[in-house]
Amino acid sequence: MKIYNTQQIYAADKATIEKEGIPSYNLMERAGGYVYEWMHHRLQGQPVPIKVFCGIGNNGGDGLVIARLLLKNGYNVDTYIVNCGDKRSPDFLKAYDALKSEVKKWPETIKSTTVLPEINPQDIVVDAIFGIGLNRRPEKWVQDLILKINESKAYTLSIDIPSGMYPEKGLDKDDVVVNAAFVLSFMSPKLAFFLPNTGRFINMWDTIDIGLDQEFLGSLPVNAQLIGKPDIQQMYRGRSQYTHKGMFGHSLIIGGSFGKMGAVTLASKAALRAGSGVVTAYVPQIGVPILQTALPEVMVETDNFNGKCFEEIDFQTEATAIGIGPGMGTDEKTVTAMGAFLKTQKSPIVIDADALNCIAKRPALMEQVPELSILTPHPGELERLIGKWDDDFDKLKKTSQFAKKHNVVIVVKGAHTVTVYDERYYINTSGNPGLSTAGTGDVLTGVITGLLAQQYHPVEASMMGVYLHGLAGDIAVNQYGIEGLIASDVTAFLGRAVMELFAKPEEEQPQEQGV
């Protein structure tokens, strides 16, 4: 699913108006009408108190249309105009006149001097105060209104975007945003919905088609898109009956050190579960008994030293793909060995965990990383690579610049893991908070390495690996719960995750943010 930016939506509005030969107000009526139908389908005339808060721009105009249609169809509605400026949009004024002329219950205007209305937990609040055009912090009294909405515990439906949130800019510590139980986003979700600092204000969201010109939208290039089951289905390569292990690649997982052999064990098993035909683990000599006992399916190769960490990385295995880093440590001898290893590599490799930290200790090593390699940092590791960022949008921008400079793929791990390549963001839609546990990153390294070994393109291997990893976690959490989920559970359900790709589709459900 494409994620359109603000200017693209405005351009689509204009293109639709010109193509259909209609006034812009007709789009407002259309948008408000679709939201009313969405609400009516769920409420079915229930007499629940509904409070509609409207700003004075086009988002507020949408709210006025919604309020008018609710009132005309017998709902218990109070409408409030949040008078947060002197300039009202022309279409807002048309919607205001329509409300006054068609129903007897006029809206109440809230000003800076007005006592804020009571909002009760049993109310439904329709938040139509600010839309995607917001670019500065609202006045203090408007912030107080937003805080009152949040403190009321009323069920809050935000129209297009929660008021106070910027669609393409991060939040400061003093910004106030509506805590939306549900967001109905026009045509596509906003990038802000999937970033930690802003996405936390959204419990669930769904998109609503308000009839903008699909041909025009389809022609627009975007730099962000959601990756879901249909995308992964298209990438997946089935297997014929007449195959053998040599046709599905040989993964080499390099890692482990004293006390951290579990990481390379998890990654090696995950590479097998991801479909790699053969897997070899390259570990310090102390790790041989552990690997041979824990994973009889995995071959083991070692360095020539009897130490607790790598002093060299010199293997004989002819691997199709290499993943390096899990549990490797950052001893100076290991950092030196890492540098020597990188000089010998020409094909893309997967770089995770301590391998990233070794590069962070010696930034010049980044110049030796093969093009199209896949880096899989958690936030701390990412910061050591690209430096500090101002907000989540700045983080993505700096990550994109770093990835472009070195021509690598970067998997930015988080609640919605983002695969960054060629100035594009591929946002994952699977996974849950249960994955916030030790070792799941090592599993992801193994999955991506296993896919890379099967000759998936590095960008595809990253997107597919992230999605299957999250989907396996979604399946596992149904058995173990969020708190009980551990990394090896994710590996155990990787096969089920692949099967789920082709299970009979269920009715599309709204997206939940996991807050």
Image: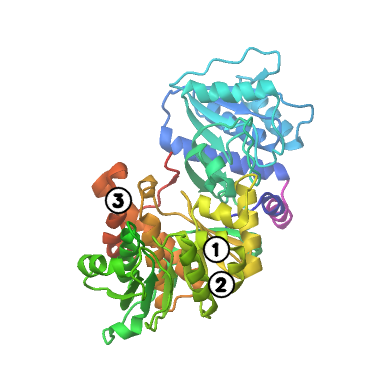
Q: Say which amino acid is labelled 2.
A: Val
Q: For residue 174, what is the image quadrant?
A: top right
| Residue 467 percent across, percent down from the top left | 42, 60
Q: Nearer the viewer, residue 6 or 12?
A: 6
Q: Is residue 398 above or below residue 433?
A: below
- Mark 3 and mark 2: Cα distance apart in space: 31 Å
Q: Kindly report which numbered mark, 3 or 2, lies closer to the viewer in this rendering.
A: 2
Residue bearing mark 3: 486
Q: Amino acid at mark 1?
A: Ile
The circle drawn on residue 369 is 2
Outermost residue toward the bottom in this view: 242
Q: Quadrant of the C terminus?
A: top left
Please state the extent of the stretch shown in magenta in the rendering: 12-23
Residue beneath label 1, please? 359
Between discs 2 and 1, the one toward the N terminus: 1
Q: Main secondary structure of the magenta part?
A: helix
Percent of width and height locating residue 343:
54, 77
Say which quarter of the image contains residue 317.
bottom left
**Nearer to me, 416 or 250:** 250
What residue do we see at 66% from left, 34% from top?
61
Q: Check if residue 15 falls in the magenta segment.
A: yes
How far is the residue under mark 2 from the one under mark 1?
10 Å
Residue 160 in picture, x, y percent from top left: 58, 41
